[in-house]
């Protein structure tokens, strides 16, 4: 898994690519979330458009980040989930926890409300 961070006025967009399956990248992702929160950046969009596969560890990474952001008074939303990832969210019932948008633009727009 690789990730890229882009900052917008309303949100920070974290673009994930590849397979989200744990490993050292998971700690890097959590460290990034902590750093953003410590800088007062509490609106986070995770772009899943480039994710090919995600296992339970990857889901756990997203849940951990969601919880950290929510506890800090922020919002953590998903964007561009592929059909495969969206079905994983439905099967695990996480679709009821995460806000999921068709595009990064729609996700950022939702954070303005």
Image (tube, grey):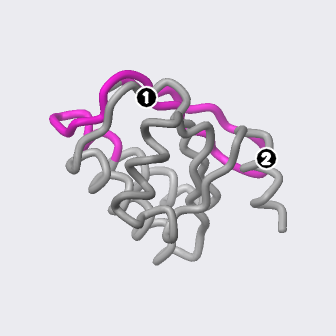
83 inside magenta stretch: no
Residue 11 image position (x, y, % from top left): 70, 49
How many numbered callouts?
Answer: 2
- Residue 89 falls left or right of residue 92: right
Write down the quadrant of residue 74 in the picture.
bottom right
Q: Is residue 24 above or below residue 58?
A: above
Picture disc at residue 106: 2
Instruction: Please name whichever residue, 34 or 74, is drawn nearer the observer in this view of the structure.
Output: 74
- Reading the image, the residue beneath label 1 is 51
- Residue 41 falls left or right of residue 93: right
Residue 25 image position (x, y, % from top left): 25, 34
What residue is at 27 percent from the left and 56 percent from the top? 60
- Residue 97 falls left or right of residue 57: right
Q: Secondary structure at mark 2?
A: helix
- Mark 1 is surrounded, within 10 Å at the Cα level, by few (under 14), some (14 to 19) or many (20 or more) other residues, namely many
What residue is at 43 percent from the left and 41 percent from the top? 85
Instruction: Please name whichever residue, 15 or 74, is drawn nearer the observer in this view of the structure.
Output: 15
Q: Is residue 73 above or below residue 38?
A: below
What residue is at 48 percent from the left and 60 percent from the top? 38
Q: Quadrant of the C terminus?
A: bottom right
Q: Secondary structure at mark 1?
A: strand
Residue 9 image position (x, y, % from top left): 79, 45
Q: Answer with mark 2 or mark 1, whichever residue precedes in sequence.
A: 1
Instruction: Please name whichever residue, 24 or 34, is drawn nearer the observer in this view of the structure.
Output: 24
Q: Quadrant of the N terminus?
A: top left
Q: CA distance from mark 2 to mark 1?
A: 19 Å
Q: Which residues are magenta?
A: 2-29
């Amino acid at each position: 898994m690789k990730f890229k961070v882009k900052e917008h006025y309303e949100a920070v967009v974290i673009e994930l690519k590849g397979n989200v399956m744990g490993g050292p990248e998971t700690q890097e992702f959590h460290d990034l979330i902590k750093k953003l929160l410590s800088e007062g950046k509490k609106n986070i969009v995770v772009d899943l458009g480039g994710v090919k596969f995600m296992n339970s560890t990857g889901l756990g990474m997203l849940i951990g980040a969601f919880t950290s952001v929510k506890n800090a008074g922020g919002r953590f939303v998903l964007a561009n989930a592929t059909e495969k990832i969206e079905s994983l969210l439905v099967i695990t019932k996480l679709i009821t926890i995460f806000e999921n948008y068709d595009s990064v633009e729609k996700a950022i727009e939702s954070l303005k409300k």
